[in-house]
Image (tube, rainbow, N blue to C red):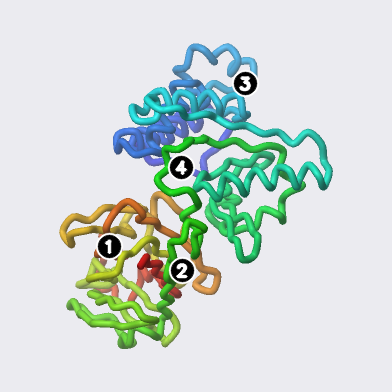
């Protein structure tokens, strides 16, 4: 078990740095043990010395000259990124048996014509369904909107700068890099389109908070309901989930005699391709974090076989302001799903806790289906 980590300790002491490294390495090990993609990237970073530790003999002399011998990252330039991508391809049995190239472009001059050239290249890749890492401040461009001619990216910073138009930051971009899969992709345009150039029509169904017809309270027993909203037929199952103050659909697992809360969708016949939803905590005072609970977004083809898409308390920093929510999107282009849910749990609840806490707020939900 990891030692308790004291953020208030003197950060210049050797003891603090030892405990900091131990704490971080334990967290990294959890991801690596989980066999997740993020854990795989951490393993590559450690093996390739991008993350350096006190036991890393290759870097000890350099670290000692810099008056630090503990866990530290290095600036990741494109030479390191290309090396990592190469290793990833070589260790992936599917990719290594096909022709996959690493494409790299550098902005040679700061001019309107050069920006236009690079922008055209970005659009070309995104239309083929290939996300692109753009550099300067490294981030991922992942979608192109034909109607507004906008390139959409995630600017990073704890998920607070998602859905940003790349044109706002074009002067900051110095280069970009991506994997070109050739003809391996089954679809020849980005899956982020509402309408694809290939002719597939995505139907967008908007579900607002008021559309469910839920009561303004949290029930201690499960409730089920049939819905037809914006042309979409679906049903919901819920526990401690209500339309609170006629403002948000709320989950509240943290109260005496509770501990679990969820909102589950079932799509009996719709061909669901993508789901996006607006989420946040109700407030900053919810008493729910990764030490005492979980908030999972899950999907399934069969109700009992749930697959976790994201752990919001470990993998994401969820907004604590319901008026400045986060928008999360999940794609299911190669998976037939019939169930989707947000489930929150909370432990260590005192029998005297008589207020509804641990509240997760849901605003709009968009369901994209394919005819």
From the top left corner, tell me how far across and down residue 158 is, in percent. Answer: 53, 52
Disc 3 on helix, strand or loop? loop
Which numbered disc, 1 or 4, marks the residue closer to the eye?
Answer: 1
Which residue corresponds to mark 1? 345
Q: Secondary structure at mark 1?
A: strand
Q: Secondary structure at mark 4?
A: loop
Please give left or right for residue 87 compared with residue 117 in the image: left
Q: Earlier in the sequence, mark 1 or mark 3?
A: 3
User: Is 136 located above or below residue 82 in the figure?
Assistant: below
Crowd band around label 4 with a 10 angstrom C-alpha radius: few (<14), some (14–19), many (20+): few
Q: Earlier in the sequence, mark 3 or mark 4?
A: 4
On the rendered image, what quadrant is the C terminus found in? bottom left
First along the sequence among labels 1 and 2 = 2
Residue closer to the observer: 226 or 119: 119
Mark nearest the camera among 2 and 4 is 2
**Rendered location of residue 165, percent (x, y):** 65, 58
Whole-angstrom CA distance, mark 3 to mark 2, is 45 Å
Relative vertical location of residue 84 with respect to residue 340 in this rendering, above or below: above
Q: Which residue is mark 3?
A: 67
Which mark, residue 6? 4
Mark toward the start of the polypeptide (2 vs 4): 4
For the residue carrying disc 3, how many other residues have a C-alpha within 10 Å: few (<14), some (14-19), or many (20+)?
few
**Residue 278 tag number:** 2
Left or right side of 11 for 246: left
Return the residue nearer the eye: 327 or 71: 327
């Amino acid at each position: 078990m990891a030692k308790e980590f004291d953020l208030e300790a003197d950060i210049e002491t050797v003891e603090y740095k030892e405990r900091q490294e131990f704490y971080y390495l334990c967290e990294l090990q959890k991801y690596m043990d989980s066999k997740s993609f993020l854990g795989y990237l951490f393993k590559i970073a450690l093996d390739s010395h991008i993350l350096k530790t006190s036991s890393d003999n290759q870097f000890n002399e350099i670290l000692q000259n810099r008056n630090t011998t503990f866990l530290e990252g290095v600036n990741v330039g494109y030479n390191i990124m290309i090396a990592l991508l190469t290793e990833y391809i070589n260790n992936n049995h599917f990719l290594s048996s096909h022709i996959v190239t690493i494409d790299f472009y550098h902005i040679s001059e700061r001019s309107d014509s050069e920006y236009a050239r690079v922008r055209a290249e970005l659009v070309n890749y995104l239309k083929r369904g290939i996300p692109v890492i753009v550099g300067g401040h490294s981030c991922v461009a992942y979608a192109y909107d034909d109607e507004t001619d906008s390139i959409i990216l995630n600017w990073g910073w704890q998920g607070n700068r998602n859905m940003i138009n790349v044109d706002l930051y074009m002067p900051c971009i110095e280069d970009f890099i991506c994997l070109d899969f050739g003809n391996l992709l089954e679809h020849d345009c980005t899956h982020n389109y509402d309408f694809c150039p290939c002719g597939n029509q995505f139907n967008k169904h908007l579900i607002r908070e008021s559309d469910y017809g839920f009561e303004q309270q949290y029930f201690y027993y499960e409730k089920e309901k049939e819905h037809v909203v914006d042309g979409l037929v679906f049903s919901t199952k819920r526990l401690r989930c209500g339309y609170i103050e006629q403002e948000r659909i709320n989950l509240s697992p943290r109260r005496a005699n509770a501990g679990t809360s969820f909102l589950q969708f079932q799509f009996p016949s719709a061909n669901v391709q993508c789901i996006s939803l607006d989420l946040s905590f109700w407030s900053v005072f919810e008493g729910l974090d990764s030490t005492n609970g979980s908030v999972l977004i899950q999907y399934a083809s069969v109700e009992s076989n749930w697959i976790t898409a994201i752990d919001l308390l470990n993998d994401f920093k969820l907004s604590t302001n319901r008026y400045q929510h986060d928008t999360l999107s999940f794609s299911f282009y190669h998976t037939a799903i019939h169930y989707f849910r947000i489930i929150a749990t909370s432990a260590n609840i005192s029998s005297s806790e008589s207020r509804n806490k641990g509240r997760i707020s849901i605003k709009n939900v968009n369901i994209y289906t394919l005819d």
